[in-house]
Image (tube, grey):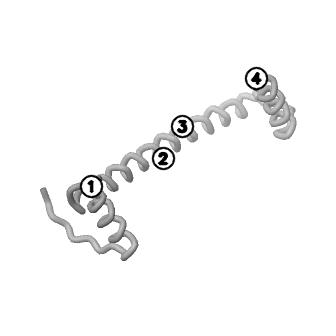
Amino acid sequence: MPTMNVSLTSELAKFVEDEVQEGEYSSASEVVRDGLRLLLRDKAARAEKLAILRQAIEVGLADARAGRLSSRTAVAIAKDLQKGRRRRA
């Protein structure tokens, strides 16, 4: 496994030390590896959400190009959504 030296702020260094002292991890390296895994998972989730949003935008643009537009305002749509939520509650 490659070794890498990393500089941490005193706050992060204390957090890592505390995690090891509490017994959650057996070494500082485990804490850092777990943090990096979480960062990778978070970045993947953001990328997936962004892809979904881009697809939704494409669908909306295609609808607009095809003339499938609503004359309702965003405020009217939001009111209808709120009414639907109140009925389900």
Question: At label 1, which amino acid type do we have?
Answer: Gly
Identify the residue at image location x=37%, y=69%.
12
Locate the N terminus by quadrant.
Answer: bottom left
- Residue placed most toward the observer, 78 or 12: 12
The residue sitting at the left extreme is 1
**Which residue bears the numbered disc 2?**
46
Which of the two marks, 3 or 1, is nearer to us in this view?
Answer: 1
**Which residue bears the numbered disc 1?**
23
Check residue 52 in the rendering and tell me which mark sits there, or answer none.
3
Identify the residue at image location x=79%, y=31%.
81
Which of the two marks, 2 or 3, is nearer to us in this view?
Answer: 2
Identify the image quadrant of residue 73: top right
Question: At label 2, which amino acid type do we have?
Answer: Arg
Task: Measuring from the top left, give residue 62's x and y in whole percent.
Answer: 65, 32
* Disc 1 secondary structure class: loop
Question: At label 4, which amino acid type do we have?
Answer: Arg
Mark 1 and mark 4 lie on one chain; the one further toward the N terminus is 1
Identify the residue at image location x=32%, y=55%.
36
Real-space Cα distance between discs 2 and 3?
10 Å
* Disc 3 secondary structure class: helix
Real-space Cα distance between discs 2 and 4?
30 Å
Locate the C terminus by quadrant.
Answer: top right
* Disc 4 secondary structure class: helix
Real-space Cα distance between discs 3 and 1?
40 Å
Question: Is the C-beta separation of discs 1 and 2 under 8 Å?
Answer: no
**Which residue bears the numbered disc 4?**
88
Identify the image quadrant of residue 53: top right
Question: Is the C-beta separation of discs 2 and 3 under 8 Å?
Answer: no
Question: At label 3, which amino acid type do we have?
Answer: Ile
How busy is the neighbourhood of tag 3: few (under 14 within 10 Å), some, or many (20 plus)? few
Mark 1 and mark 2 lie on one chain; the one further toward the N terminus is 1
Q: In this rendering, is residue 37 above or below 53? A: below
